[in-house]
Image: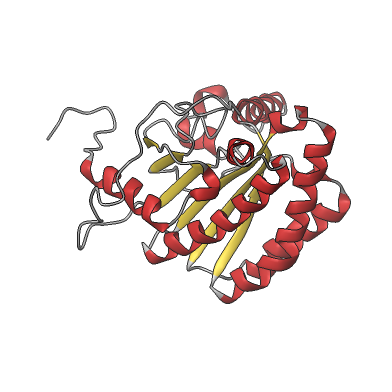
Amino acid sequence: MSETEPVLPRLAVALATEEPGARPPEHVAIIMDGNGRWAGQRRLPRVAGHRAGAQAVRRCIKAAIEHRVRWLTLYAFSSENWRRPPDEVTDLTALLRHYLRSEIAELHREGVRVRVIGEHSRFGPEIRAELEAAERLTVGNSRLTLVIALSYGARAEILNAARQIAAAVQAGRLTPDSLDEAGFARFLSTDGIPDPDLVIRTSGECRLSNFLLWQSAYAELVFLDVLWPDFDGAHFADALSLFHRRERRFGARPG
């Protein structure tokens, strides 16, 4: 992800709080950007930024639960991240392994279900086994579903869906005329997950970076000028406040 300077002003923490009785978004998705810049500003190795970012993940999950959000998707590792220097990929992989071993039990106690999307098999059999174990352990939880996007890329996801559909048509299990948007979505890795109502990106960058492109067609987008390791409950509340101030029309005229 880009490491250029933020382009949006910092939202004041006191901008507004969530209106009493306001219905929270069902699904919040977050592009966690700025770990490397955060480390660079402190003249620390990039891995220090990723470690600080893991602390922000804990704060984010806590905030989602407090605000009664039912689905939280975190863009933890994009398919493009494999192009980063090998040492950084190794550090990220080690951090993921540590997170799984240290956090899953606590998430389970808090009633959080873990679901993983993306080509996570690329991380190797050890991490794949731990991810599958986390999903099995937490499958019955319903307080919050935490969707972790690992080695995920939206274009690859859509292309894979198109290939599956073509194969189904070729095999006679599906006819082109019978396919609608809901049917197409069943071939995506997010099958069974509601589309995000709100997509947040930190660090001030204003793009989706190949994240949930199909699913975010009608999502509200909020770009925060805060580096991910500094993200906390107040920033989460800021984003929800902006969400509640917007009128979602889904292509229709204002009411």
Q: Judge from the rendering whether residue 7 lies leftward or rightward of residue 106; answer left or right.
A: left
Q: Is residue 13 left or right of residue 169?
A: left
The furthest residue to the left: 255
Q: Residue at x 72, y 41 (%)?
A: 45
Name of the residue lying farthest toward the right = 125
> Residue 10 placed where, x, y %?
36, 38
Q: Is residue 192 visible?
A: no
In the displayed structure image, the side of residue 247 where residue 220 appears, left or right: right
The C terminus sits in image quarter = top left
User: In front: 255, or 56?
Assistant: 56
Q: Which residue is depicted at the point 57% across and 43% down?
A: 190
Task: Tell me the residue at 47%/68% (across/down).
Answer: 143
The front one of 26 and 177 is 26
Q: Work out whether residue 55 or residue 250 is closer to the camera in this orientation and state it.
A: 55
Nearer to me, 128 or 37: 37
- The x and y percentages for residue 78 are 66, 35
Residue 169 position, x and y percent, is: 66, 26
Q: Is residue 39 left or right of residue 16?
A: right
The reply to whether residue 104 is visible in this rendering is yes
- Residue 85 to residue 39: above or below: above
Residue 115 vertical position relative to residue 244 in the rendered view, above or below: below
Q: Position of residue 136 (x, y in %)?
A: 70, 66
